[in-house]
Amino acid sequence: MSRNVCDEGDDERDYGEEEDEEDDECFDYDYYNATDYDSELYECERNKDSEHFEYECLQIEQVERLLNESVESICSSIGINPSLAKVLLYTHKWDIDRIKEKHKRDSFQLLTDARIKSPRNSRTVDTANRASSYYIQCNICLQSSSAEKCASLSCGHQFCKECWCSHLEVQVTQGITIGIECMAQGCHILVPEDFALNILTKTSFREKYQQFAFAAYVKSHPELRYCPGTNCSVIIRAKENKSKRVICKHCKTSFCFKCGGDYHAPTNCETIKFWLTKCADDSETANYISAHTKDCPKCHICIEKNGGCNHMQCYSCKHDFCWMCLGDWKTHGSEYYECSRYKENPNIASESVHAQAREALKKYLFYYERWENHARSLRLEAQTLEQIKTRIHEKVMANKGTWIDWQYLLDAAALLAKCRYTLQYTYPYAYYMESGPRKQLFEYQQAQLEAEIENLSWKIEHAETTDRGDLENQMDIAEKRRATLLKDFLSS
Amino acid sequence: MANIATQRIQREFSEVTKSDESQKNLISIELVNNSLSDLRGYISGPPDTPYEGGIFHLDIKIPETYPFNPPKVRFLTKIWHPNISSVTGAICLDILKDQWAAAMTIRTVLLSLQALLSGAEPDDPQDAVVAKQYKDSYEMFKLTAKHWTSVYAMTGFDKWRYPDFDYKIQRLMEIMKVDEDRARVALSSNNWDLEKATQSLLS
């Protein structure tokens, strides 16, 4: 077993030597979420940046204030109580203007649509039972109770408060709050907040109700989204519901605002969902193919890939080759780099069903392998970054250079991760693309990006022999390629 | 069981027994092991449907939180229907899930199930194979459902027979050495195509 030569001679690496000065904070530099880096270097290009997205990270109290403003606005303009205003806002996705407009047109229709009032034709239900006697038989527990021990919503369906309470407790336990309906058969009138809190007597249920209701309001609000980070309570607010990257200021989780999944540019939310489902279904087939080891195409020694760079050099025979296609690396010069491109069999339509199925699998595996490989490279490059950090730390402790002297290396690693991340997500995009000139252009740009990323990765792994200017130049090229691809293909 | 659930079931029990539908032998319920949380329901197949003449047995479990949560109901009698699993008897019906209302009763559930037998909803299927057959070849679906009714839901001598189906089941049992039920499922799921059914048992 040989190792990827990229990893060789780690200990010999020399990152420079000068005054001693240490800045520990910089070691916590966030590898995947290089926003600071972004804003500094590309501030002037912000307006042109296709990934740019306006959003803010809010705390629960801030969101409560925000929601209350909407509630007050509705209360004052329509003249209903806050609980009903909340039902209205919830059922209309917090679109204040639409509510006001509907109110102007037909206020009764507005209230029936929002399930606050029963429609005209069924409004007279149960009135006999309600009006005639002091005692009311509750249809749920079948007991008679005095009228003050009963309650009803606007629909007039009377039930005893004990049954209401049991009903609400069962619903709240299941996480339902705003959507709780009247207990009568076929009645869909919603239980408003004040009614619920009036009925629920136990503190634990009242708290749960308020907590779940708040979550339901946030989820129904198109401008708000919970940060998907573990145990993170931050709520992101963005004016536009677009599939753009959001990075939580609190827990640093990076995700797509629209779908809440991992950020996936240039692929869109629907496509990435298809792709991930497909991969989850087919991964068993694909796994054995994209194994961790391959043989050197020249001397056939077994090679384990333990670095992120796809430019491989055989430890034994020094042959330079590409990990993906096993071809000679020399043919991977910028213009001719095309091992990111899948070549479809042009005669496939005339082949048998069996051959077509095999071709379909082959095509999928081609993209899956590259998708998986870049994901793995990302993980391996994260390890490389750790090694770089350790080395820098050692060097600084040994008075060889200052933190500032190697800042550029960390910047380079962060940029590499960012570029490779985008590159990884170009593969599902390409997989679902129709053949044609647009796909050709996409694959051309993808190939260009991939070539520059591999160059960058190689230079970072060989930092001790790479000139700083050369490396920074490479960073610039890679990021430009990435920005170009996103500009052309990231639809907003 | 909670007090309210007990009272409700007792009352609902007599509601079903005294109902018109029960007098006409269309629905009925009885206790299992003298426990109010475990009931057995019976519905007759509605006229002018492939289920006509059949009596379908239902397993009804009353949850602790009844009537604020719906009863758990499934078919004990095997049945060929898009909204009922041909394997487990599980039912896909909105009032047994999120459309349940505490004011509903066992009687309304039994009547709703009978209505479900009269009008299937293939776009909201529980059994995808049956639903596909229902949409693609409705005549085949009707024959299959009628066959299942006569085999599993009818007793006595007035059973409906379709010699072609019986013959194919026998053949498949001989070829594949499987029991009758498995052979029937395999054939029903493959539009009674003997070759395809054999293949499905092989894979």
Image (cartoon, rainbow, N blue to C red):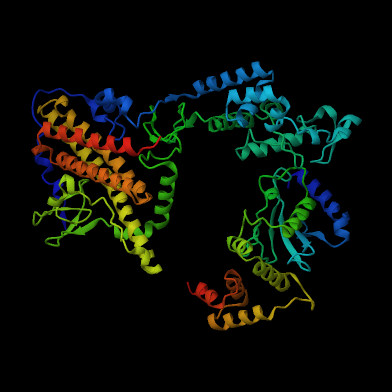
In the image, A23 versus A373, the foreground residue is: A373
Question: Residue A138's image quarter?
Answer: top right
Q: Is residue B138 above or below residue A162?
A: below
Pick the residue in front: B1 or A485: A485
At a point 51% along the width and 21% down the height, the residue shown is: A61
The answer to whether residue A331 of the structure is visible from this angle is: yes
Drawn side of residue A228 relative to residue A131, left or right = left
Query: What x and y, as percent, mark residue A171?
Result: 65, 38
* Closer-to-camera residue (B32/A391): A391
The correct choice, above or below, for A261 with respect to B63 in the image is above
Residue located farthest toward the top when viewing the structure as drawn: A76
Judge left or right: residue A131 versus residue A339: right
Q: How many marks?
A: 0
Placement of the N terminus of chain A among the 4 image quadrants: bottom left
> Where on the picture, by quarter, is residue B163?
bottom right
* Residue at the (81%, 33%) spot, across then down: A123
In the picture as drawn, the residue positioned furthest to the right comes out as A132
- The image shows residue A364 at horizontal and vertical percentages of 35, 56
Residue at x 54%, y 83% (from the top left corner):
B175
**Rendering coords of residue A35 (x, y %):** 31, 28
**In which quadrant will I find the C terminus of chain A?**
top left
User: Where residue A144 sits in the image (x, y, percent)?
Assistant: 86, 36
Can I make out residue A389 in this image? no
